[in-house]
Each structure stands twice: as structure tokens, then as C-alpha cells.
Amino acid sequence: MIKSKLLNSLTRTLGGIGYRMTERIWRLGAGARLFFLTIFYSGESFKRFHLTLREIYFTGVMSLLIIVVSAFFVGMVLALQGYNTLQKYGSSEAIGVLVALSLVRELGPVVTALLFAGRAGTAITAEIGLMKTTEQLSAMEMMAVNPIARVIAPRFWAGVISMPILATLFSMVGILGGYIVAVPLIGVDDGAFWSQMQANVDFRLDIVNGLIKSLVFGVACTMIALFEGFDAPPTAEGVSRATTRTVVISSLTVLALDFVLTSFMLVI
Amino acid sequence: MDLWVGVFVALGVAALLGLAMKVGNLTSSQIGPTYSVTASFENVGSLKPRAPVKSAGVVVGRVDSIVFDSKKYEALVTINIDKRYAFPKDTFANIYTAGLLGEQYVGLEAGGEDDALKNGDKISQTQDAIVLEKMISQFLFSKASEPKSDGKEADAANKPADAKSTGVKKTELGDAPF
């Protein structure tokens, strides 16, 4: 009796793990399929480009405030912390390089992507999930309107276009924040701050690589948000769970992708 | 709404331009048409491709490539110099370090000849990078040999012989602030 109970619970646990694994892999496949469909129907959606413009407004322009404010504070904190350590080695002029390189290479793309997932990704998931719940997507199909071309693709391209712009703005505003702390507040030399930065930040190796990173994060974040919304169970609980999952999966994907991309870019 | 999207995209382009011009080296790294010369060093230290080539402290070019010459066991450094600057044939190429532990760069000291360096020429007079470990070991050796010498005469007799054996490098070491 006891033995069979133990065996039962063991099989159930193993079965649960297997079920979850299969489900994850199924979701990965479905997500990839949605991605290819989105690319495939993009041409159709570009004919009505005002839809994409509208989505750029909602995902990009509306995210400006949170991006700019957080970039400013991130830059200021970087300058403060960096100065604290650098002055021990008597090289406080290198503060400009430190702030610029950490923002352009890493923090700009990554923090922007994390904020974007929280600010715009959740909105996309909730919107599409609710469209599905209220059967708007099915209604579109009934009217021979392709929901992927009409709803998914504009949001996808809006995210992909917005993310590099937001990341660039993040880096620029962050450097300005670092400048404000380093030069007027702490008293690092103004010329050394900029000239050391210009001597050590490379356009192709640092700035363009940062842009590539943010582009990849844009594709990943937007696609995850779209898929979670598209796949959400049509209930209030389902939409709420999908929204949570968007943030969790986007953040983890961004951090993992960041490691992979960095290891590719730093090959000497 | 379209207006705001336009403003947004314009802001992005402006930020990229700002990054490229103010933060990056897009403006400063562009040196005009160049000619390339080579120089071989016994030791280049941690010199890297794209390191600056300076003369009198002004950047006049960049290091193009560093390869190992397996026949002479030397490092062959190709440098690109801006066409605007002509250097005499007997120019001296050194590897210096910016600051105490900073990056290394090639320093050119003009000689006195009338003929100028041309594309593909080789700089024959070079001086290697100073390797800190070598300097320290040489310093320790000279310290260790000091008590053995009987007096000032022997010490004085030692010095020229020493300088002869290691050539130019010894004078460089003698100036080191130990």
C-alpha cells in the first residue's frame, strides 16, 4: 500500500515535470511560428503605416518619461560610485570613460529593455489578451481581416523601432546625468571628462554594438509580449498571468541574450 | 500623434549624433589619407592595433597591424601616418606608455635627414617597450652587485662596460627614477 502510494506520487511528479517541459517547448515553437508569420505579413501591414506610427506613439513616445528620468538617475549614481572608487587610485578624470562605456555598452540597452518590458510589454500583452477575451480577434478574422497583419505586426515593428531610439536616448541622458554629478558637483575637470571619453569610446565597437544589442532586445521583448498576449487564456485570470509572464520571461531573456551578445562582441 | 512620433524619432537621431560626435571618437579618429611604414621591435609590450602614433605629443597616425616575424624573432609593426606629415628617413620610433600604467603608443622622433619616409619604407632605428619586470630585475641585479665592488674606482670602471653590453637601453634605465 505505502509503496504504491510512493510510486504514485513519484510518477505524478515526474509526469508534471515532463508536462511542463513539453508545454515550454510547445510555447517556444508557437512563439517562433508567430514570429515568422509576423515577418511574413509585415508587408501587408506596412501598407497602412499609420497603424505602426500609432503604436510607436504608445510604446515609444509614452515610454520616454520613465526612460529619461531613470537614465538621469542611473548616470548620476554611476558617476558618484565611480568617483568614489577611482579617486582612491588617483584617476578621477577617468570618470567620463567609466560612465560612458558602462552606459553605452551595457546599461543603456539592458536597463532600457527591462523598463520597456515593464512599461510597454505589459501594455501590449494586456491589450492583445483583452482583445482575444472580448473576441475582437475572431471578429476580425470573420471580416477577412488578418489579425496578425492588423494587430500584431504594427506593434512588433513599433517595438523594434522604438527600442534602439530609447536606448540611445538612455545612454545620452545618462552621460549628461553623470556629467552633472562629476563636473559641477564633484569638481572633475570639464575638459578631461570629455576628452578621455572621446579617446576611449569607439564608435563602431561601443556605440554600434550597443545599438545592435538594443535592436535584438527590441525584437525579443516585443515578440514575447505579443506572443503572451496572443496565447493568453481568454479569462481575466489568464490575461493577468500572461502579463506577469511577459515581464518575467522578457527580463530573463534580455539578461541571457546580453551575456551571449557580449561574449560575441568582445572576441579579440 | 504623428508629430510626437516625429519628435521621438528626431530625438533618437539627435542622441545618436550626440553619442557619435561628443562621446565617441568618430570625429577625432578620422585621419586623412595615410601612408604606411614598418618598424621592427624586439618587444612591443602591450601595444595594440589602432594605438595612436604620436610625434611631439600630437597624434599623427595609428598602428595598423602587429605581426611576429619568425625569421628574425621580432615584432613587425605597420603604422599608418597621415599624408600631411612627412618624416625624415632616419626617424626614431619608440614605444612609450601613456602615464605610469596607461596604454602604449608609438612615439616618432624626427631625425635630420633630408629624404622623407615614403609608403612602404622601414624605420630602422627603434626602441622597444619598457617591460617593468625587466627593469626591476636589472635594478635588483645592479643592487646585488654593488657591495662586491671595492670602491668608487671599481664601480666607475664597471659602469661603462655595463652600458656597452646592453646598448641604448642602459641609458634609458639610468634615467629611471629609482
Image (cartoon, rainbow, N blue to C red):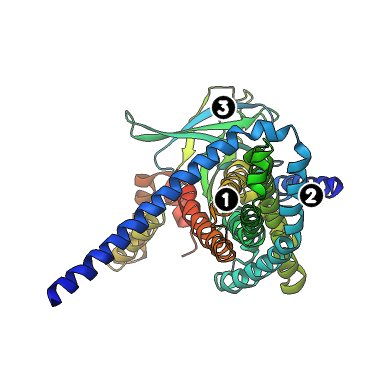
Quarter of the rendering containing residue A189: bottom right
Q: What residue is pinned by disc 2? A: B8
| Tag 3 and tag 1, C-beta contact below 8 Å | no
Going 50% across and 53% down the picture, which residue do you hit? A258
The correct choice, above or below, for A144 with respect to B57 in the image is above
Report the chain holding disc 2.
B
Q: What residue is pinned by disc 3? A: B36
The verdict on a common chain for dots 3 and 1 is no
Three-letter residue code for mark 2: Phe
Q: How many numbered marks are there?
A: 3
Query: How far, Cα to Cα, is label 3 from label 1?
Result: 59 Å
Percent position of residue A177, x then y: 72, 65
On the rendered structure, is A63 left or right of B79? right
Query: How far, Cα to Cα, is label 3 from label 2?
Result: 44 Å
Residue closer to the observer: B156 or A149:
A149
Three-letter residue code for mark 1: Phe
Residue closer to the observer: A144 or A224:
A144
Whether residue B15 is visible, yes or no, is no
The earlier-in-sequence mark between 3 and 2 is 2
How dense is the environment of label 3, judged by Cα within 10 Å: few (below 14), some, or many (20 and up)? many
Query: How far, Cα to Cα, is label 2 from label 1?
Result: 28 Å
Residue projecting furthest to the bottom: A2
Report the chain holding disc 1.
A
Three-letter residue code for mark 3: Ser
Q: What residue is pinned by disc 1? A: A230
Report the chain holding disc 3.
B
The correct choice, above or below, for A7 with respect to B169 in the image is below
